[in-house]
Image (tube, rainbow, N blue to C red):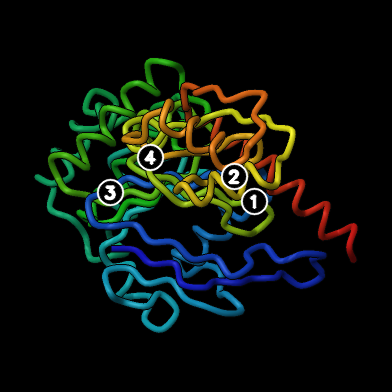
Amino acid sequence: MLQFLNVSKRFPGAAAAALDDVSFTVGKGRICGLLGHNGAGKSTSLGVLLGMIHPDRGEAVIGGCSVQQNREGAIRKVGAIFEAPAFYEYLSGWRNLKVLTAYSGGVPESVMRETVAWVGLEKRIHDRVSAYSHGMRQRLALAQALLPQPELLILDEPTDGLDPEGIVEFRRQILELRDRRGLTVLLSSHLLTEVEQVCDEVVILQGGKKVYEGRVNGFGDGRVFYRLESENENITRQLCVDLGGEIFGERVAFPSDRKAADLLAALVAGGARLTCFAPESGSLETLYLEISRVAKEQGKEKGGEA
């Protein structure tokens, strides 16, 4: 459904690239979380996807259509909440939706009423937006994004400022959009726990580079993390890789069908002098922090070599 192909972007006067040869794919009907610290490249990526930022190299493809070569065709089936939603404060929520959908040819009122009810705004939709709370504005923004009946939904920090009840309701809505309507969702967020509960997969950006792409629950039912310490670190790491492991700093991930006892025996037989071999309960936070730490260390090493 969505392909981000070798995209690079450096803004004029910037010391480093905002995006450096970034590629990732989101399949139809999947929810993908886009993670990274401030300045990692998340907003630039979304801008490229929406055709608001032109990359120096590479392209974004939505539904088989290039955003850079045919923006109108590519984003025809895209709904988005990007940066802070902007509405006409002196108009009602209903009038705002009428005005905003008119730009794309309008939407039948029956569809508007159904969408407004689904986001939970039917009792306040005819009030002025100036009287809306932050949560109500987010609901209105979601309604606006859904009215074109998109196949892809792009959301930039959609739960920012919501209270706990609003976050729970948003989570329910996103899962329903995937399960009942088959929507594909790309969700940029700082809230790791929310991403872990909603998303099927994640893409992690660090300093404009992609440092991880994979399933959110990959370290649950798909693989197990182990903390390793040894007296011959290089040999131990190579043995882990030879046994099908993936190194993440001081941790290594093995497929969950590999028994810990068998792995330990193979490492010792191969010459690893282990002082610690302990399985860890995986979480997205653990993965994110470990990958970020390793990426920063590698960046320092490259800087030192230069």
Please tell me whether mark 1 sits on a helix, a strand or a loop: strand
> Can residue 147 be seen from the camera position used here?
yes
Please tell me whether mark 3 sits on a helix, a strand or a loop: loop
Indicate the amino acid at tag 1.
Answer: Gln
In front of the other: 71 or 295: 295
Residue 255 numbered tag: 4
Residue corresponding to mark 3? 30
Crowd class of label 4 (few under 14; some 14 to 19; many from 20; radius 10 Å): some
Indicate the amino acid at tag 3.
Answer: Arg
Q: Across the whole image, how many numbered discs are drawn on residues? A: 4
Residue corresponding to mark 2? 36
Indicate left or right for 46 with 184 as reference: right
Above or below, comparing residue 132 to residue 165 in the picture: below
> Which callout, 3 or 4, points to the residue nearer the camera?
4
Alpha-carbon distance for marks 3 and 4? 23 Å
At 71% from the left edge and 66% from the top edge, which residue is drawn?
A: 17
Q: Are marks 2 and 1 in contact (CB under 8 Å)?
A: yes
